[in-house]
């Protein structure tokens, strides 16, 4: 096991696939709202980008309502402007939207339908300060947090085009990564981001697909999304590290009635439910439902999505019929692909460092320092 670090290479080179200026992220905080309230933790300016004029300089304790009006943005007590309006806090201050605090700048603009879009314009490292604790508990060991910081940075940069048609790079929800701004920061997670500043995972000089999940339940899953091919580093493998006394999701039991499954998948009256196929990691691949209208075969991941991720915590389960329902006995929590977070914790507690953790879950990837080009 101590040879794990051999399967990760450490290179300090430029990643050619990264667009220039990508270190400044646009995170869409609010979309299609009719009004917002802005303030800051200290002095701030509001600038109308249409005229490039500072329209207001004020203390943070003052709050201002901004609403759409007559084709523009009406700032309460100040006037109506075409926008976008940028809120720029004083050097060490944070901007606020509806009482949520953010580093960087806030851009408020009108979008189609006369609604407001709020975008947080922020350096990627500062963005990660507001992500890490939302994605991994800050009481996990530092080497696990550092591994998570690197995969969160890589994940953010490789998903930059996800919402480009809407005028921003990333959203603040699970779809991209959960981001709650400055209020979600903590000392250990910020330290983990700082200690791994600019490091990403790559494969063949492209950003790696750094999928991760809470707990694999003993074996990671093969890559399940067909559109991503070229990912030999996302293989199923035994994970002896996530069976941890504090991991309450390692094994779970869930009972679901036939009636509920019948309603969810619009079948006839159900007589039995069984696993039809397994994938190479032993996870259920398809589920066979026998009912009064015939047989239905459902993809196991779809079954999990429809019945609820928190009820069917993974597809690594066995089941038995307990008329009139099904009892699932499972292990793990999440899709199982890539890094197992509880496994990363187990590895860190066993003395492995972040390079060994990443090398174990993404076998064959490189750790690279990303270098961005200056704005021309
Ligand atoms: Zn998103
Ligand atoms: Zn695991």
Image (cartoon, rainbow, N blue to C red):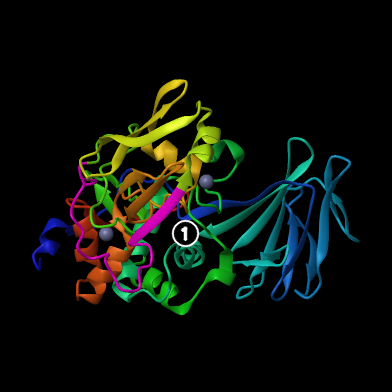
- In this rendering, is residue 75 above or below 277? below
x and y, in percent, of residue 345 in the image: 30, 70
Boundaries of the magenta span: 232-255
Label 1: which secondary element: helix
Residue 373 in sight: no
- In this rendering, is residue 64 above or below 310? below
Check if residue 235 falls in the magenta segment: yes
Image quarter of residue 276 = top left
- In this rendering, is residue 274 above or below 357? above
Quadrant of the picture in which ligand 2 is shown = bottom left
Q: Nearer the viewer, residue 275 or 374?
A: 275
Check if residue 319 falls in the magenta segment: no
Image quarter of residue 181 = bottom right
Disc 1 target residue = 124
Q: Nearer the viewer, residue 4 or 290?
A: 290
Q: Main secondary structure of the magenta part?
A: loop
């Amino acid at each position: 096991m101590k040879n794990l670090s051999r399967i990760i290479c450490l290179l300090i080179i430029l990643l050619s696939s990264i667009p220039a200026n990508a270190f400044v992220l646009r995170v869409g905080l609010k979309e299609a709202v009719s009004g917002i309230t802005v303030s800051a933790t200290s002095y701030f300016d509001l600038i109308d980008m249409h005229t490039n004029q500072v329209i207001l300089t004020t203390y943070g304790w003052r709050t201002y309502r901004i609403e759409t009006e007559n084709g523009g943005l009406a700032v309460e007590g100040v006037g109506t402007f075409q926008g976008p309006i940028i809120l720029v806090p004083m050097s060490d201050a944070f901007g606020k939207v509806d009482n949520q605090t953010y580093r960087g700048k806030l851009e408020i603009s009108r979008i189609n339908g006369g609604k407001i879009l709020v975008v947080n314009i922020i350096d990627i490292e500062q963005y990660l300060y507001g992500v890490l604790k939302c994605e991994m508990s800050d009481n996990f060991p530092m080497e696990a947090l550092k591994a998570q910081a690197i995969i969160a940075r890589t994940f953010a940069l490789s998903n930059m085009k996800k919402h480009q048609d809407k005028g921003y790079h990333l959203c603040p929800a699970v779809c991209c990564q959960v981001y709650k701004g400055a209020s979600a920061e903590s000392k250990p997670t910020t330290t983990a981001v700082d200690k791994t500043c600019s490091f990403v995972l790559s494969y063949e000089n492209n950003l790696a697909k750094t999928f991760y999940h809470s707990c694999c339940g003993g074996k990671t899953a093969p890559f399940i999304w067909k559109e991503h091919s070229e990912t030999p580093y996302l293989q199923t493998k035994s994970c002896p590290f996530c069976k941890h006394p504090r991991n309450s999701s390692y094994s779970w039991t869930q009972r679901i009635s036939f009636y509920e499954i019948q309603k969810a998948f619009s079948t006839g009256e159900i007589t039995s439910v069984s696993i039809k196929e397994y994938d190479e990691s032993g996870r259920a691949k398809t589920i066979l439902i026998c009912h009064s209208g015939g047989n239905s075969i459902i993809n196991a991941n779809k079954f999990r999505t429809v019945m609820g991720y928190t009820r069917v915590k993974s597809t690594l389960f066995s089941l038995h019929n307990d008329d009139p329902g099904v009892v699932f006995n499972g292990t793990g929590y999440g899709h199982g692909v890539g890094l197992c977070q509880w496994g990363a914790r187990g590895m860190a507690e066993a003395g492995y460092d972040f390079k060994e953790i990443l090398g174990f879950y993404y076998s064959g990837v490189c750790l690279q320092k990303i270098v961005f080009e200056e704005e021309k």
